[in-house]
Amino acid sequence: MLTLSTIRATLKSVRSRSRDTRRGRKGYHHGRLRQALLDASLEIVAEGGPSALSLRKAASRAGVSHAAPKRHFATVGDLYCAIAEDGYRKLRAHLLERVAQSDPVTPVQALAILGVAYVEFATSHPGHFRAMFHPGVTDRAASHPLEQAVGEAFDVLVEAMEHCRQAGEVRPAPPRELALGAWALVHGLAVLAVDHQLVNRGFSSDDPVALARESTQQLYLGLRPDL
Amino acid sequence: MLTLSTIRATLKSVRSRSRDTRRGRKGYHHGRLRQALLDASLEIVAEGGPSALSLRKAASRAGVSHAAPKRHFATVGDLYCAIAEDGYRKLRAHLLERVAQSDPVTPVQALAILGVAYVEFATSHPGHFRAMFHPGVTDRAASHPLEQAVGEAFDVLVEAMEHCRQAGEVRPAPPRELALGAWALVHGLAVLAVDHQLVNRGFSSDDPVALARESTQQLYLGLRPDL
DNA sequence: CCTACCGATCGGTAGG
DNA sequence: CCTACCGATCGGTAGG
C-alpha cells in the first residue's frame, strides 16, 4: 500500500543510505574508486550517449589507470548494470519523494504524480535512464541486485494502482494490467523526450513534464467522449 | 483523412516502389551494393544489437572490401539513418496494410488496429525499430529524406485521430495532442517488449500484441470507473 | 570497387 | 592500483 506513512519510512532509509556517498573530486583511490567510476561513466553517457562508454574512458576520467577498474567491473556490461541499478534506486526515491512533496488527497492524484515524476526523472537523469533501458543491461537483469532494484521501482507504481483499485477510483481490472498500461504511456513519453522525438514532431518539448501531465489525465479520462 | 480509398491508393504506390528491390544473395557489386549493405547491416543489428554495427562488418557480410561502402555511406551514422528511413517507410506501409486488411467499420476501430500494428511491427522488425529510435539517428533527423519518412509515418496516426475526432468518437481535443498520447502508449509498449522488459516484469510476453490490444482498449475507455 | 597501408581505441594480461 | 606490453577492431587514405 502506498500510504504516507510507508512513503515517509521508505524515504528515511533511502536518504540515510545515500548520505555516505558524498565525495570530493579527487582523493578516491582508496575505497571510493567504485563510486568514482560510476560518476565518471554517468558523465560520459550523458555527454556522448551509451556508445561512448568504455572502461578505459571511465578509468581515465576517474583519474586512474585503465587496468584499475578491473577489480570492480570486469566488463563494460557490468559498468552499465551498476549504473542501471543505481538509476532504479534513484528513480524509486524520486517517485516516493514527489508523492510525499505533493501530498495528494486521492489515490488517483498520487498516480498522476507518479506518472509526471517518471518523465521528470528520465529527462533530468538521461544518463541513468539510458543505461536502465539499454539492451544488454535489460537482458542480464537476472543479475540479482539489479533485478531487485527494478522490481522495487515497479512496485511503487503497482501499489499506487492497487490503492486506486481498492478506493474504487479505477476500473475493476487486475492492478498489474492497469499498471502496465500506465507504465507504457509514461515510459513511451520519456523515451520520446530523451531521444528528442517530441521536438522533432513539433511538440513544445521545452517542458515534457507538461506533456506528461496532459497525457496522464488523458489516460484517466479515456479517449471516448463524455456520455 | 484515412479513408479506404486513400489507403488503397497509398498501398499501390508503396508496393510498386518495393518491387524492384528484389535481390539474390550474391551478385551485388554493380548497382545493388547499397541495398546489400542495408540488408547486411539489418542482420547485424538484429543479431548483436546496435553497438555491433560497423562499416567493416557490413562490408564483410555484403562480400565487399571495407573501403567499398564509402561511396554510399560515409559514416556508420549514415548507415543507421538509411536503415531508419527504410524502417519508417516499412512501418507506414505496415500500418496502412493492417488497416486495409481488417476493414474497420468505425474510425476508433481503425485507431486500435494502428496501435496493435505498431507494436507488431516493432517486435517483428527489431533491427529496423532499434535503428529508428537510436540516439544519433533521431538527432540527425533534420536530414531531409529521413525527416520526410518520419513525418509520413506519424501522419497516419494523426489522420486516423482526426477522423475519429470528426466522427465525434473521441473527446473534443486537438487531434495532435490525442495522437501524442496514443503514440506514447504503443511506443512505450513496443520499446518495453523489444527490450524484454515485459517478460522480466512477469507479463506473458509470448504475445506482446495481445498486451497492445488490451492497452489500446484501456486508453479508449480510460482508467476511471464507469459512471 | 580492391589492396595495402596508417593511427587510434579498446579489452586483456604479466609483473610488480 | 600502476606500467608496459599484446592482439583485435575500427575509420581513413593512397593509389590503382
Image (tube, coloured by chain):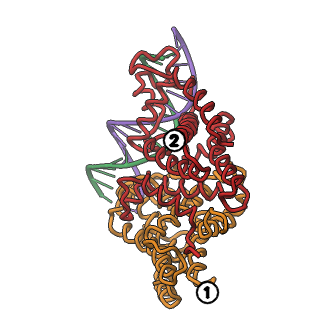
Chain colours: A orange, B red, C green, D purple
Q: Position of residue B140 (x, y in %)?
A: 64, 42
Give the residue type at disc 2. Arg
Give SS at disc 1. loop
Give SS at disc 2. helix
* The C terminus of chain A: image quadrant: bottom right
Q: Where is residue A188 in the image (x, y as percent from the top left)?
A: 56, 58
Which residue is rendered at x = 38% and y = 41% of the image?
Answer: B47
Which residue is rendered at x = 62% and y = 48% of the image?
Answer: B157
Nearer to us of marks 1 and 2 is 2
Q: In which quarter of the image is residue A70?
A: bottom left
Q: Which of A39 and B77 is in front in this view?
A: B77
Q: Is B8 above or below relative to B138?
A: above
Q: Is residue A35 visible?
A: no
Q: Which of A59 and B152 is in front in this view?
A: B152
Q: Mark 2 points at which residue?
A: B98
**Chain of the residue on which disc 1 is drawn:** A
Q: Name the residue under label 1.
A: A105
Task: Specify few, some or many for label 2: CA neighbours under 10 Å numbering under 14, 14-19, or 20 or more.
Answer: some
* The N terminus of chain A: image quadrant: bottom left
